[in-house]
Amino acid sequence: MKKIITFLSVCMMSMLPAMASAESKIAVVDIYRALMSSVSAKAAVAELQNEFKPEQDRLLQLENEIKASQEKGQRDAAFMADEDKRRLFEEIQSKKADYKHIVQKLQKMQAQREKQFLAQNKATIDAALKELVDELKIDLLVTREATLWVSPDLDITLKLLEKLNTKKAK
């Protein structure tokens, strides 16, 4: 048994120099951050803001109406009849429900558009990553989400962003 352990130890020691000379180049990338910081993403966000402007304006209007109704209730509560207080409370609750409904609708639409944008740009991302891997001779590329900590020297997110912006410019 002792001879086997000694033999395995010698084999492992002889392999260390070969393993050390085969240095691998590792890089980390935050694909989502690069894509969402790109020129095309900023244009898509601006387009979305214009498209959702009526809903956003309605949200602002509802906020102001709710605030005004609440202030009225606090200011005039001592002078209001119980029926008027109840009606005001129901009005506030109704406006809050409308507000919540619009917010949920906007969030759902935004998530849907973001998913579409990611799907539309998948080929561009893949091509840009392939170019970076070839240019930088990367052996292992890891997503930022899969790491706990990474040295800024290994992060190629900004290089991916530059590739994405130059691909969209062409």
Image (cartoon, rainbow, N blue to C red):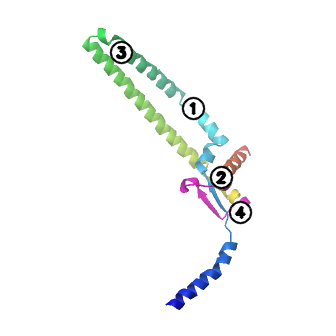
Q: What type is the residue that disc 1 sits on?
A: Gln
**Residue 137: mark:** 4
Residue tagged by mark 2?
152
Indicate the secondary structure of the residue bearing disc 3. Answer: helix
Residue 146, quarter of picture:
bottom right
**Is residue 11 positioned above or below 66 on the image?**
below
Q: Badges 1 and 4: C-beta atoms under 8 Å apart?
A: no
Residue tagged by mark 3?
74
User: Which residue is depicted at the point 41% across and 20% down?
Assistant: 66
Q: Horizontal and vertical percent for residue 126?
A: 63, 55
Residue 150 magenta-highlighted: yes
Indicate the secondary structure of the residue bearing disc 2. Answer: helix
User: Which residue is depicted at the point 69% across and 51% down?
Assistant: 159
Q: In this view, does 98 lie to the left or right of 24?
A: left
Indicate the secondary structure of the residue bearing disc 4. Answer: loop
Q: Give the range drawn in magenta.
A: 134-153
